[in-house]
Image: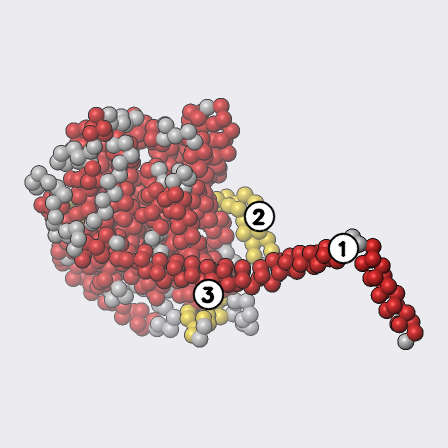
Amino acid sequence: MQVLIVLLPLLGALLAMPLGRGSARTAEIVTTGLVFLAALLAWWTFFAVGFGDSERTIRLFTWIAVGDLTADWAVRVDALSATMMIVVTTVSSLVHLYSIGYMSEDPSRPRFFAYLSLFTFAMLMLVTADNLLQLFFGWEGVGLASYLLIGFWHHKSSANDASIKAFVMNRVGDVGLALGIMACFLVFRSVEFDVILETVRAGGLVQPYGAAAPIALPDLQIQFLDRTYAAVEIIGVLLFIGAMGKSAQFLLHTWLPDAMEGPTPVSALIHAATMVTAGVFLVCRMSDLYAVAPGASALITVIGATTAIYAATVGLVQPDIKRVIAYSTASQLGYMFFAAGVGGYGAAMFHLTTHAFFKALLFLGAGAVIHFSHHEQDMRFMGGLRQQMPITFLMMLLGTLAITGVGIPMVTLFGAPFGFAGFVSKDMIIESAFAASEAGQSFAIYAFVIGLLAATLTAFYSWRLIFLTFGGKWRAPEEVRRHPHGVPSTMIVAMLPLAVGAVLAGMLFYKPFVGDGAAGFWEQAIHVPGAHAGEQHGLEAEAHAEPVPHGEESLAEAAREADHGDAILGEAEAAADHGGHHFPAWVLWAPFIAMVLGTIAAWFQYSRGDDPLRPGLIGEGGMLYGFLRNRWYIDDLYRNAFLKPARLIGRFLWKRGDEATIDRFGPNGLSALTGASARGAVRGQSGYVFHYAFVMLIGVTILLLIILL
């Protein structure tokens, strides 16, 4: 059955174009129906594996067998892959349904639905992989599908440029991933997750290629340039570089906002809930390795927190409704990564799951607004749509309440914190960062402070979007106000399940993901520190459990850190009890206060008065506005540091190297020499008999001289 979950979308992708020749509607119905069936099977698998059956691997056939390198084509079924399967198939099925209405006027609908299903298949291959090579196949598959979907409207040069940019930027990150896979094979002589992770958990012996004898994994060093590094650190950093590219983390993020050139359903599917979460999935899948690689984990923490604040600041001034949500995606991915960096892998997966609901809801709601407004995406030409689109307004309002983290701190319902999905999951991340900082983990305090600041900015730009789009007067051109596009019912129906998830997903998934059922739910799927300690639960265990000694760290040092964690627990228990997690009361209230401050600032700027576009704290024309509007000038930096020099070098090699040297003395030179020789020979053929007789006489004379001499 789990095999069908993966193969049904592939079947839809193969059938879409042939069926579309007869009727585009047939292609839409078949592909959508197959993905919905896959989603139903995925949910059944999720409950069966997460709350009943143990994990298993379905091996289909041997894919590669060359020497020691063996890779099976398999479907790995555990709590982590089952979670990703419900995220991918649920969002994909609803996006398929939504696209029936959104793309109703496009003549290439069968091709579009084929690409959607192909992307879904590739993503499912990625999350059910049993080894790094199969994961890499799915990894590159979603890269290809994203290229096709972003550039779907290939008649637009901006869409073509965006698809190429996404493809190239992802290839940069994929170099790191490929090197990380090679390093894993070098060290562990295998690319299978079970072999790698069991060796890491046991801290056992490994014998890399070229080593004379087995070496304890914590002691293994790899030389790079003129320095040596711990093998687990090198592997962790390389794999994370791949995750940075796919998940649009700081410095490899520039492709994500430009990818909004694709149709809005593409944005919802690829850039909100599935493709960009592949990096988070990879880090969580390799969580046992990162648990013994503090340097790599610290890098993840720094990059994740920096991405969270970078994307949040840039989102403050974007006029394009889809770009605001795109930067919001990058910011929320930053939360997930720094959660994993501080050891909160369950919290990272928790936020990944809840984020899929409310972010897909926001994208689909934005798509409805764009469809209604004749494909206008600039919020400055919207406004007043609350009366025109009441259902869409309600959907986006619920999504905004979820992403901003609206809830009541220190209040529980059925053992879970009471609030919208984002409130529960994002607060778990911030609390895990605080607990890790108290335990002395590197850069955790940076992540905690940035997490609170980003929460304030998230509330500001999210409510800014609502106020500019739905509040005030309708600022659209006259022709749009006279003849708005109606929103098809399929688009509205597709948003309803996402709205339910945005409200309830946090409370429903709290216990198994990060609560007292986390150890039993995840089992060996992800690293849950301290899961053996009966008195510790969820994130509290993740933050304060006995750390695994790294490298040359002694058992005494590990014991002292454990004692330090117990002391922190005692202090925290005296302060507050939050759904089984013990933190000071101010830590529990801090995210809520940050959200309130951001909301009030947005209301003061964009909801008061008749002109929501009046200058505010970040006025147009100012230095800060220019810095943020130009995205910290990182794109300009890349343009000046890489693009322009590459063009200059390319032009020099073209003009001076190719044309002036290779062509001149190569094919063009030989051609010119042959032509000149031919022209000379032609001049020698005068047609006069006495010329030919004279030449013959000279030839005979030379021949006689040679004979006589």
Given contact means CB atoms under 8 Å apart, are the residues at marks 1 and 3 in contact?
A: no
Instruction: Please state the horizontal and vertical placement of residue 244, each as a whole percent of the image.
Output: 36, 55
Q: Is residue 453 visible?
A: no
Residue that label 1 marks:
685
Residue 63 on image: x %, y %: 56, 48
Ranked by sequence position, the earlier of labels 2 and 1 is 2
Specify which label sits upstream in the sequence, 1 or 3: 3
| Amino acid marked by disc 3 | Gly
Counting residues from the N terminus, which is met first, the one under dot 2 or under dot 3? 2
**Dot 1 alpha-carbon crowd within 10 angstroms: few under 14, some 14 to 19, many 20 or more:** few
Q: Secondary structure at mark 3?
A: loop
Q: Nearer the viewer, residue 559 or 388?
A: 388
Cα distance in 3D space between marks 2 and 3 = 27 Å
Q: Is residue 696 left or right of residue 106?
A: right
Query: Please, what is the three-letter code of the amino acid marked with disc 1?
Result: Gln
Viewer-nearest residue: 288 or 230? 230
Other residues around mark 2 within 10 Å, as few (<14) / some (14–19) / many (≥20): few
Instruction: Look at 83% across and 55% down and name the residue there.
Output: 689
Q: Quadrant of residue 334?
A: bottom left
For discs 2 and 3, the disc positioned in front in the rendered view: 2
Residue 277 rendering spot, x and y as whole percentages:
35, 48
Instruction: Report, in whole angstroms, how far the alpha carbon at label 1 lies from the one at label 3.
Output: 87 Å
Q: Image height check: is 701 above or below 311?
A: below
Q: Residue under label 2, please give it.
A: 62
Distance, label 2 to label 1, CA atoms, is: 72 Å
Vertically, is 430 above or below 14? below
Q: Which residue has dot 3 on it?
A: 204
Nearer to the camera, 512 or 76: 76
Q: What is the secondary structure assignment of the residue under circle 1?
A: loop
